[in-house]
Amino acid sequence: MQKRTLLAAMALTPLLGACGFRLRGAPNFVFRSIYVQAGRGAPVGTLLRRNLESSSDRLVVIKDPASPDTADVICQIVGEQAQRIIIGSNVAGQVREIELRLLVTFSLRTPGGDMVIEPTTIRQIRNVTYNETNALSKAAEEEMLNKDMRNDIVQQIIRRLGAVKSLETS
């Protein structure tokens, strides 16, 4: 039985390549240098800088805030807003479910001011059950989910930066 499964898997493997499936791989950027403009201590800005530095050997991330105009493009984190909303409670008024939201607005422009990517908002939402008796573990879970949402948003921003085909305004 295991031999049949193995043979079937080996027979279907070439079909994955024929359908257009391939791993995402490293993005190819049309620009050679980028400056990430974000507020001091902004978690998404810091994470974006780190991920861009490790994403490609050909991409230079300008870190000097005095000279952002030396970069080919400037990625500006316009806003980063974390929200914690109570969406469920029991009859006694105790919280039972919380919705975590993270909204990040970014744009991409040339040093001359031409917009390559207009201000775009990316939203991540996670639902968390809540129990007062496990408040400490639920706080740790919320922090883990917030970190996960930031990572997801940074990966989406990098994919959108990689999708830019030219630095001319759209």
Image: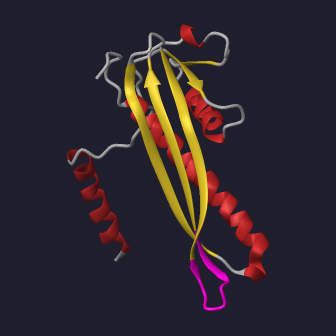
Q: Residue at x 66, y 77 (%)?
A: 130
Count the numbered circles shown: 0
Task: Measuring from the top left, give residue 70's x and y in whole percent.
Answer: 55, 8
Looking at the picture, the colour scheme in use is secondary structure
Q: Residue furthest bottom?
A: 91
Q: Is residue 130 left or right of residue 135?
A: left
Q: Residue at x 38, y 28 (%)?
A: 117
- Report the side of 38 relative to 41 (left or right): left
* Residue 31 to residue 50: above or below: above
Q: Which residues are magenta?
A: 88-98
Percent coordinates x, y for residue 89 in the rendering? 60, 82
Image coords of residue 138 (percent x, y): 71, 71
Left of 136 or right of it: where is 164? left
Give 26 or 77, whichever is nearer the viewer.
77
Identify which residue, 149 or 37, lies in the foreground. Answer: 37
14 relative position to 55: left or right: left
Tell me what residue is drawn at x 38 percent, y 43 percent.
Answer: 23
Between residue 34 and residue 2, name the one nearer to us: 34
Image location of residue 149, percent across then percent down = 56, 52
- Queried whether the magenta region covers residue 25, the answer comes back as no
6 above or below 21?
A: below
Q: Quadrant of residue 110?
A: top left
Quadrant housing the C terminus: top left
Residue 55 can be seen, yes or no? no
Give me the residue at 68% from left, 65% from top: 141
Q: Is residue 42 visible?
A: yes
Q: Which quadrant holds the N terminus?
A: bottom left
Above-or-below relation of 72 to 42? above
17 or 2, nearer to the observer: 17
